[in-house]
Image (cartoon, rainbow, N blue to C red):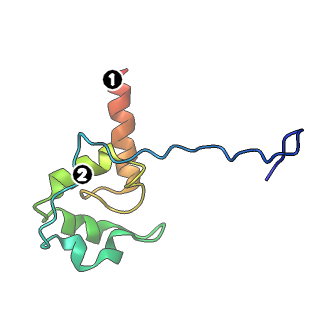
Amino acid sequence: MAQTTDGKPTPAPVIAIPLADPLVPYPEITGDEPCLQDPDCWFPEQGVNAGRAKAFCRTCPALTDCRAWALANPHLASEGVWGAMTSTERNAVRRNTMGRAA
């Protein structure tokens, strides 16, 4: 840790980590969601096709709520497939939405 000129330690910077967007609640979980059956499928390694996970997502009753939550909370859903979208697809939607709002 760095020290100030008076020899006291410099306090570590405070980094704010935003919590979930309260306007978009986390999807209600019933236990029937496909992502609960094989969680590893939803976090494929870089370069691995996410088609299987996305296909399962499209059958989920929570699809719309899951997608909305993931789009509203990129800091919490930065990886994996959420709402039948990869992180790249979610980022593109956010960029397009921001571009239209400007």
Q: Bin the neighbour count of mark 1 within 10 Å (Cα to Cα): few under 14, some 14-19, many 20 and up.
A: few
Q: Amino acid at mark 2?
A: Arg
Disc 2, disc 1: CB below 8 Å?
Answer: no
Give the vertical position of 39 relative to 77 (above or below). below
For image coordinates 43% across by 70% down, the residue present is: 48
For image coordinates 16% across by 70% down, the residue present is: 33
Q: Earlier in the sequence, mark 2 or mark 1?
A: 2
From this viewpoint, which residue is outermost toward the bottom?
A: 37
Say which mark, if any, is on residue 72: none
Is 9 in front, or is 28? 9
Q: Position of residue 56 (x, y in %)?
A: 20, 69
Is 63 in front, or is 54? 63
For image coordinates 88% across by 45% down, the residue present is: 7
Q: Bin the neighbour count of mark 2 within 10 Å (Cα to Cα): few under 14, some 14-19, many 20 and up.
A: many
Q: Amino acid at mark 1?
A: Ala
Q: Position of residue 71 (x, y in %)?
A: 31, 46
Give the vertical position of 81 relative to 23 (above or below). below
| Horizontal relation, residue 4 to residue 65: left or right | right
In the structure shown, which secondary structural element does the residue marked by tag 2 occupy? helix
Say which mark, if any, is on residue 67: 2
In the structure shown, which secondary structural element does the residue marked by tag 1 occupy? helix
Q: Position of residue 46 (x, y in %)?
A: 48, 67
The mark tally for this picture is 2
Write down the residue under mark 1: 101
